[in-house]
């Protein structure tokens, strides 16, 4: 029997005892047996994943970009953070791309995170009407209640009432002044008693 055939037989036998064979499980199983070692497997196949594929234990699943991005966004939303550790923990009980799939697709974990962050930023501009409506409503409301009404008083008010900031308004309209001009709102100076 060739070394490759021995490895495949050993992997299939060890895998019959567990739903998904890990390196650690294989090492525990092979410890007291005359079976190829983990190092033998690496030498013959180059990686654990390649050995599992060769033995028919790993279905080759190619994920599309949108599937990977969707999984990363969902993990980020549910975990509150997007670190490789948080993702691995989140992905364990789900049928989603593995950390290895993501790294293979993007080249690194940090590039995957940057891609998701970039898409999240774009997502906010995909909903311009709702975002703009919220800003317009906030600006009209602030203009009605603030004396004087200007960027400084608006910023304090916006922070207190969780409204869009001056910076966000400026990004959306091009500038603070352009936002006010478009809405026909005028800044006012200090009101003296």
Image (tube, helix red, strand yellow):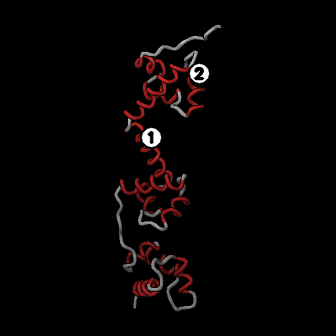
Q: Which quadrant of the figure has residue 68?
A: bottom left
Whole-percent x, y for residue 187 in the image: 52, 14
In percent of the image, x 45 and y 64: which residue is there? 98
In the picture, the disc for residue 121 is 1
Which mark sits nearer the N-terminus, 2 or 1? 1
Q: Which residue is mark 2?
A: 153
**Taking 177 as reference, is 90 above or below it?**
below
Classify mark 1: residues with Cα within 10 Å, few (<14), some (14-19) or many (20+): few
Q: Which quadrant of the figure has residue 28?
A: bottom right
In percent of the image, x 36 and y 61: which residue is there? 63
Out of 146 and 173, give the one closest to the viewer: 146
Quarter of the figure with the N terminus: bottom left
* Labels 2, 1: front one: 2
Whole-percent x, y for residue 59 in the image: 36, 73
**Position of residue 33 in the picture relative to residue 172 (left or right):** right
Query: Looking at the image, do the residues carrying marks 2 and 1 touch, with CB atoms under 8 Å apart?
Result: no
């Amino acid at each position: 029997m060739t070394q490759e055939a021995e490895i495949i037989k050993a992997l299939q036998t060890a895998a019959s005892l567990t739903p998904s064979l890990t390196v650690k499980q294989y090492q525990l199983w092979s410890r007291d047996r005359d079976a190829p070692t983990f190092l033998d497997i690496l030498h013959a196949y180059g990686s654990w994943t390649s050995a599992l594929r060769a033995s028919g234990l790993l279905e080759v699943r190619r994920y599309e970009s949108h599937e990977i991005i969707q999984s990363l966004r969902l993990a980020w939303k549910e975990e509150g953070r997007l670190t490789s550790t948080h993702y691995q923990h989140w992905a364990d009980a789900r049928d989603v791309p593995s950390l290895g799939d993501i790294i293979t697709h993007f080249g690194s974990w940090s590039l995957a995170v940057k891609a998701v962050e970039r898409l999240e930023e774009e997502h906010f501009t995909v909903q311009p009407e709702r975002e703009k409506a919220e800003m317009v409503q906030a600006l009209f409301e602030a203009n009605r209640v603030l004396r004087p009404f200007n960027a400084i008083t608006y910023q304090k008010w916006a922070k207190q009432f969780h409204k869009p900031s001056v910076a966000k308004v400026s990004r959306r309209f091009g500038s603070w002044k352009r936002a006010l001009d478009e809405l026909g709102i005028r800044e006012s100076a200090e009101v003296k008693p």
